[in-house]
Amino acid sequence: MDTAKSAAAEAVDMKLEVVVIGVADVDRAKAFYTKLGWRLDADFVKGEDFRVVQVTPYHSGASVIFGKNVTATKPGAVDSLVLAVADIDAARAELVARGVAVSEVFHYAGGPFNNAINPPRVSGRDPQGHPYYTFASFQDPDGNGWLLQEVKTRLPGREWAPVLQTADVATLTALLRETAEQHDVHGKAHGEHQWWDWYAPYLSAREQGSSPEAAAAAANHHMEEVLLKV
């Protein structure tokens, strides 16, 4: 195996962007999800045979899409979509206040998502107070299932830490030096441009955890878009 190529592949950002679910009545589903307080991102219609609606849970990086002729997935076929919450009691109370039928708080007898035990769910919080172990559930009008999972503290290694998590002077200096060096490589291969148009996407990508190579690729792509607009 070429370890250099493998490392480069692992450095590429891959963020879960969209989950597609099947619904029988698009307007009913739209009303339900917007009632949850989720942001309505899109509602596009093309003729009588196609419609796509996109909604995003509050502060979520991933969105939910449904519509007409969007997916072959049957209405209600999606189960156990997970919404991480810091306080399950507060999250449950908010959904109830919005008119949603939410289960009581429960934990799995055999640990999270273990449905091998009958019955799998036990009423009440996880008795040991483990993070990730306490849940509540609800369904949309089509029966698509959602789980609230309480995550007060994430386990080590469960978060993509940004490069500038601690933005001290030394870290900023090193990153700016790196950005300047990467920009010099770009500048030799391209014509005149405003340096800040390259610096901004590079720094942004690095802050989000991208490798220098991936950040440079993102900056180069941004520059191509900028130059097309000139």
Image: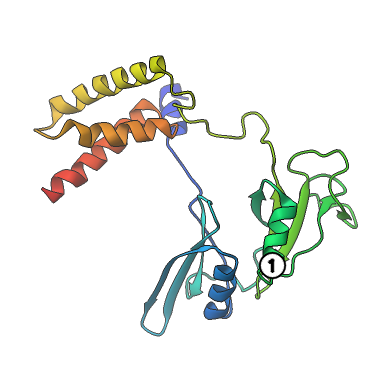
Q: Residue at x 65, y 49 (%)?
A: 84
Residue shown at 24%/21% (left/top)? 180
> Is residue 217 shown to the viewer in this render?
no
For residue 219, what is the image quadrant? top left
Check disc 1: other Cα within 10 Å, few if <14, some if 14-19, many if 20+. few
Q: Residue at x 81, y 56 (%)?
A: 105
209 up-or-down from 44: above or below: above
Q: Is residue 67 above or below residue 85?
A: below
Q: Looking at the image, which residue sits at the far top?
A: 170
Q: Position of residue 74 (x, y in %)?
A: 61, 73
Q: Position of residue 23 (x, y in %)?
A: 58, 74
Question: Whole-percent x and y of residue 128?
Answer: 86, 38
Look at the picture and state if 147 lies above or below 194. below
Q: Secondary structure at mark 1?
A: helix
Q: Which residue bears the numbered disc 1?
A: 97
Give amino acid for label 1. Ala
Residue furthest bottom in the image: 48
* Structure colour scheme: rainbow
The total of numbered circles placed on residues is: 1
Could you tell me residue 218's position as x and y percent? 31, 38
